[in-house]
Amino acid sequence: MKITPQHFSQQVNKTPAPEEKAKPNAADNIPTERNTVNAKVDVSRQRMLSWFARVGISPSMLSPDPKKQKHAIERRKQILETQKASNLQAVLNIALNVTINEQTTENLDPDWFFAFSTMAEVIYSPPMQELWGKIFAVEVARPGSFSLRTLQLLKTLTHRDAKIFSKAVSVASKRNNDPVPQILVGFHRRKGLFSFLKRPVPEHVNLASIGLSYPDLLSLQEMKLIYASEIESGEYTEGQKVSLRCVNDTIDLTCQTSGVALVYYKFTPVGSELYTLVGKSPNEPYLAALKTVLGEVFSIT
């Protein structure tokens, strides 16, 4: 049989498939990485310009024209002097609103005042200005309360440093009317012959767990606000009592065994002076942890 073209079935004309719609480009809806980087650069640039403007500096402030250059420099001096006067005014306004009950008739040392004003005029942070205002109010009421050495140190502190110191103050206590505050961290017990038979006890409070980290302690030591190493008290005998005042709480301890010494960080003289100015709020987790640790060797009431 001869095969002819008639034996082939007719081809079916298929409807052409519709063209696929073009997928949207992700770059059309999402900012490119370059745009994001540029936006961040613009924000940083504006911040830089804003900060330098506060000290009278701009990228094009100095003109080749000597007269315009002199005018720009004089304007910068005026901005700086105005800010210094504003800082001192803020400190004064704060001091005027501080109430001091006990006052003496002794006059303020002029050398102290002019040294104070020279340092206070470059304090720009409102929280630190509040601290300087309180210092001035107390010094006027009781001259000799704050040394120039304390002011020199305080001048170098930032708001962040002050916050760390406030955390230390919230866990500080005074023992038996001792004027120097301390951060009590636990106890040390003289090892006895059979001490290895007893279960281990947590002899130290974990300060990091209550908000005062080891880096915070190092910062306080570097700022000369607390001494650099732990200090041990003398050993207590069985039945000996000691009283602690921590912010608003009084803790009475009675030693249950001999050979026990309290371990603490002691505030320096500068730290002790600043301690009187910082607002104090109790740190309840610290008090609970301290009582748990000391309860191993002391009766607590």
Image (tube, rainbow, N blue to C red):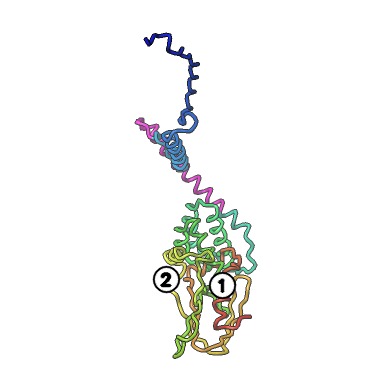
- Per the image, the residue denoted by label 1 is 289
Q: Kindly state the secondary structure of the residue where label 1 is placed.
A: helix
Q: Give the range drawn in magenta.
A: 62-90
Residue lying at 36% horizontally and 32% vertically, measured from the top left: 66
Front one among 192 and 18: 18
Magenta highlight on residue 71: yes
Residue 228 image label: 2
Front one among 5 and 197: 5
Q: Can residue 149 be seen in this view?
A: no
* Residue neighbourhood size for the residue with mark 2, other residues' Cα within 10 Å, grouped as few (<14), some (14–19), many (≥20): some
Q: Specify the amino acid type for callout 1.
A: Ala
- The quadrant where residue 283 appears: bottom right
- The quadrant where residue 218 appears: bottom left
Image spot of residue 188 (x, y percent)? 47, 81
Q: Quadrant of the C terminus?
A: bottom right
Q: Quadrant of the N terminus?
A: top left
